[in-house]
Image (cartoon, rainbow, N blue to C red):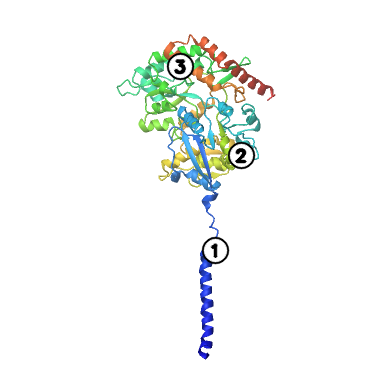
Amino acid sequence: MIRYRSILPLIVFLVIGLFVLCWSIWAQNNKSPLPAPPNEDQQIMFLNLFINAPLDMALPERDTDLIRQIIEKKFNVRIHVTAMVPGNEYNAKIESLLFSNNPPDMWIDRSSDGASKLSLDGVLADMSSYVSPLSMPNYFKYWVTEKELKQYQIHNRFYRAPIPYDKNSYRSYYIRQDWLKHLGLKIPHNYDEYLQVLRAFTFDDPDGNGKKDTYGFTTSGNNSSLSTDWPEYAKNGLVYPAYMNNNKLVDMESDLRIEHVVDDILKVINGGLVDPDWFFNSGTEHIDKAIHGKVGVVLGQTVDFALDANPGSIQSLSRKLDPKANWVPFNPLGNQPLRAGGSPEYPFVFAKMTADKYPERIKKIVEILDWLSSDEGFLLTHYGIEGEHYSRRGNTITLLPKKAEDSRHSVDSLKLWGFFTPETPSVLGLQIVDPNTTARDTDIKTFLVQLPVKAKLGVTLAPPVGIDVGAFRSRQNELQVKMLFSDQSGKRWPVYYNEIMSHYNGFQIIKNFEMQVKSVASGTR
């Protein structure tokens, strides 16, 4: 008994210890899991953008896309971007994405009708809740006025907003001056002199290689249209893209004078003076041919089209292949205007599918676009990082010499993300000092500034509600191509004109355009 009492406390202790151990094991195996540490990726918003790209740009990979990395970090997003050269393939790709119910969240519309058909099809989001001076203060402060935005509405609904645009006009033809010098010719100042130069560029071996492998002029017909690049339009008084004359709207592409435009184009085609494959060129393939020394005259539309300071210009790229290449601007029609004053052109749009399911994505994109419109965003996407690519003193921006380690990828990153704002730093009150600017560049800019321009319309034209302007333009293009390749004459254009104007709502479309211009001019819109 005494022995039992002496070991009893030990037994109790062991039992209690065993119980505590078992309870601890059970509790450990059945306790509620602790919340996982916050995962930063869960907070990242994924965005899908579809934008236009310049001809000579290769889409940089994410790890070499400096600008995208900065944007993604700043806004805590992950951006999937598709960038293509504008043209038929660009539009076809967007159409295929819409058809498969897989639209980008935001895209730049480059269709001929300015997204009119898409708005009628119900695939575009109403922007009223997203784009305003409150949500995009920089966009409205520097680039687009509320009045312009109101005039840009389509079918009286807010489905699109204009990409910031350069108010100046730089539409000019460019010619190989080194070819002229080789042939002992001067820059042409009228249409007859222009034709003489085309013949010389085609038949007189302007590059001196002993071969007949050059042509006078080229453009891209995209296998579908006449192309508005031909100087024969302006020769017949048709100025790009439309203008008012005697209180009537003149639509460059459908006017009755197209009969004479086609006849004049046929003369240079049948004379063998132009690139025989011009109609099959797509997008900017014609510029690539010019760069490779196959043609001596093309149309340019940007201020830096042929500048030495632009490494992607026709001049810089041509010089890599031929050190003597020298592209200079000229007007084959003397002092005749080549276009009307600038107006908003291409819009950015949002997918209705995204707005319905993920409206926060649209809000984030709006935030990013407004930042791209700001001083900070503009400088980054056009010139790079302060201290590395440029120095700043007040509003004077001095570009620094490019470093050896600056790869092609960093250059492409700038070209890609500069899509939203034009190269017009003066809008932001900035003055750019570029050590790469040459005297030749200064001469080109001086020439472009003095080019005559028709008065601008003052409004972006939109077709009437329920009318497909795309069908009108498509039939117009079909019949014009028929005149070139089948009829071999513009004589039947009055008949074709009556067809598109009567059966494809042309009269109604043009009348509606005209009313828009008049209402803006009278201040009633």
Residue type, label 1: Lys
| Quadrant where the C terminus is found in the figure | top right
Residue density around tag 2, few if under 14, some if 14–19, many if 20 or more, within 10 Å: some
Q: Position of residue 364 (x, y in %)?
A: 58, 42
| Contact check, label 2 and label 3, Cβ < 8 Å | no
* Circle nearer the N terminus (1, 3): 1
Image quadrant assignment for residue 453: top right
Q: Horizontally, is 140 left or right of 381 in the view? A: right
Measure the alpha-carbon separation of dots 1 and 2. 53 Å
Residue type, label 2: Asn
Residue type, label 3: Val
Of circles 2 and 3, the one toward us is: 3
Residue marked by disc 2:
138
Q: Position of residue 118 (x, y in %)?
A: 56, 28
Image quadrant assignment for residue 201: top left
| Contact check, label 1 and label 3, Cβ < 8 Å | no
Residue marked by disc 3:
481
User: Regarding mark 2 in the picture, which secondary structure is present there?
Assistant: helix
Measure the alpha-carbon separation of dots 2 and 3. 44 Å
Q: Residue at x 54, y 55 (%)?
A: 38
Residue marked by disc 1:
31
- Pick the front one: 447 or 156: 156
Q: Position of residue 126 (x, y in %)?
A: 62, 34
